[in-house]
């Protein structure tokens, strides 16, 4: 009986794999045949528009969970931008953003790369999806023109550091921590004790420094004085329509509006080639799962590690 069951399971697994591969092949064929849309590796002659997609929370390398990479890897995004920057056919780039933000350094590296591309006279347009908040908006601010859907959640200009205080729970459970450290602040923001006033001041100073960098870069990218941005930079979120009124976004519209603007700014024809990213159905499926996990559970706090008790210093919107 066990042998028959194993044979049945093996047959079912093979049939399932065959079905997945068939769907994969059909999807890739459809993707490859979209009119006017190509991979960067395609031998297409003529100037066109490049697309880079930023989905999920942004960290330097992404967060590995088994065989999946959760969130947006800054290193992968930077490689894509570098490829677009070096391709003489690319006259404009659309940065499609669907992200609640991410870690400070990862976000800043993408911002700096986009600003460098602007200096090369490559037209950079941001297209905001469901959410482009905090670090997601930081990256958008590097773009020459920002288009958001009317209902896009954006803004959330600010910085946050989060660490749970479990001291009361530890005391109830009779748990005590033995701590041997090299300096007074080595276990700063540890979950097993309260934060001292000196430690709070240190963390606040670091947050303030990152916040001022955020303001400076938004001011630089949007060409808006910092004093005009600061009243809105208290962590508040806003809709795409509100962001246009606040001058944080250029206009409302979807991805097609971003394509039209890219063509206009770069002086390209209506039928110019669009070089989208080389993704496949599996990547999109796992990316969707990753996004759901991050949004629902703040999974990065559990996976990022807790050196010094600090999980993340983030440009991150936390609903």
Image (tube, rainbow, N blue to C red):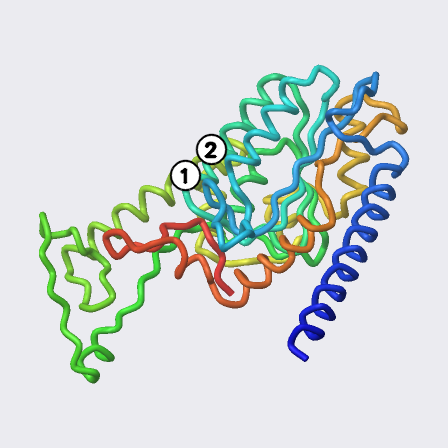
Residue 222 in sight in this render: no
Q: Which residue is mark 2?
A: 109
Q: Position of residue 65 (x, y in %)?
A: 49, 55
Q: Position of residue 183 (x, y in %)?
A: 9, 48
Judge from the rendering whether residue 273 lies leftward or rightward of residue 91; answer left or right.
right
Disc sitting over residue 298 in the figure: none
How far apart are the two marked residues, 1 and 2, measured between alpha carbons? 6 Å
Judge from the rendering whether residue 98 lies leftward or rightward of residue 196; answer left or right.
right
Q: Residue furthest bottom?
A: 172
- Nearest the viewer among 206 and 11 is 11
Residue 2: name its quadrant: bottom right
Residue 184 in sight in this render: yes
Q: Position of residue 101 (x, y in %)?
A: 51, 50
Residue at x 66% of width, y 24% of height: 84
Judge from the rendering whether residue 187 lies leftward or rightward of residue 257; answer left or right.
left
Residue at x 55% of width, y 45% of height: 72
Determine whether 203 is above or below 225 in the image.
below
- Nearest the viewer among 11 and 115 is 11
Residue at x 79% of width, y 41% of height: 257
Judge from the rendering whether residue 266 lies leftward or rightward of residue 191; answer left or right.
right
Mark 1–mark 2 CB contact (< 8 Å): yes
For the residue carrying disc 1, how many other residues have a C-alpha within 10 Å: few (<14), some (14-19), or many (20+)? some
Determine whether 177 is above or below 209 in the image.
below
Residue at x 36% of width, y 50% of height: 313
Question: Secondary structure under badge 2?
Answer: helix
- Nearest the viewer among 76 and 150 is 76
Total numbered labels placed on residues in the image: 2
Residue 216: name its quadrant: top left
Q: Position of residue 138 (x, y in %)?
A: 52, 42
For the residue carrying disc 2, how many other residues have a C-alpha within 10 Å: few (<14), some (14-19), or many (20+)? some
Determine whether 91 is above or below 95 in the image.
above
Q: Which residue is mark 1?
A: 105
């Amino acid at each position: 009986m066990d042998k028959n069951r194993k044979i049945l399971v093996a047959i079912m697994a093979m049939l399932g794999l065959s079905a997945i591969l068939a769907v994969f092949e059909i999807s890739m064929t459809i993707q490859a045949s979209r009119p006017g849309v190509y991979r960067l590796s395609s031998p297409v002659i003529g100037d066109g528009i490049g697309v880079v997609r930023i989905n999920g929370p942004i960290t330097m390398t992404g967060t590995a969970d088994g065989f999946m990479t959760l969130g947006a890897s800054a290193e992968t995004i930077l490689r894509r931008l570098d490829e677009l920057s070096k391709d003489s056919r690319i006259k404009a780039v659309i940065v499609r953003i669907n992200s609640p933000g991410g870690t400070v350094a990862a976000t800043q590296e993408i911002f700096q790369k986009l600003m460098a591309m602007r200096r090369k006279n490559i037209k950079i347009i941001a297209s905001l999806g469901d959410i482009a908040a905090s670090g997601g908006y930081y990256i958008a601010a590097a773009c020459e023109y920002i288009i958001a859907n009317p209902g896009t959640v954006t803004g959330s200009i600010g910085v946050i550091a989060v660490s749970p205080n479990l001291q009361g729970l530890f005391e109830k459970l009779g748990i005590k921590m033995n701590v041997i450290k090299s300096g007074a602040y080595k276990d700063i923001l540890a979950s097993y004790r309260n934060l001292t006033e000196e430690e709070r001041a240190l963390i606040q100073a670091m947050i303030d420094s990152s916040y001022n960098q955020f303001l400076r870069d938004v001011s630089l990218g949007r060409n808006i004085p910092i004093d005009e941005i600061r009243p809105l930079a208290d962590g508040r979120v806003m809709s795409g329509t509100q962001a246009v009124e606040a001058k944080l976004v250029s206009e409302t519209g979807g991805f097609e509006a971003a394509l039209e603007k890219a063509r206009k700014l770069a002086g390209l024809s209506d039928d110019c080639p669009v070089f989208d990213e080389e993704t496949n159905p599996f990547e999109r499926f796992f990316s969707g799962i990753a996004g759901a996990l991050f949004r629902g559970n703040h999974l990065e706090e559990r996976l990022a590690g807790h050196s010094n008790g600090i999980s993340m210093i983030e440009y991150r919107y936390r609903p």
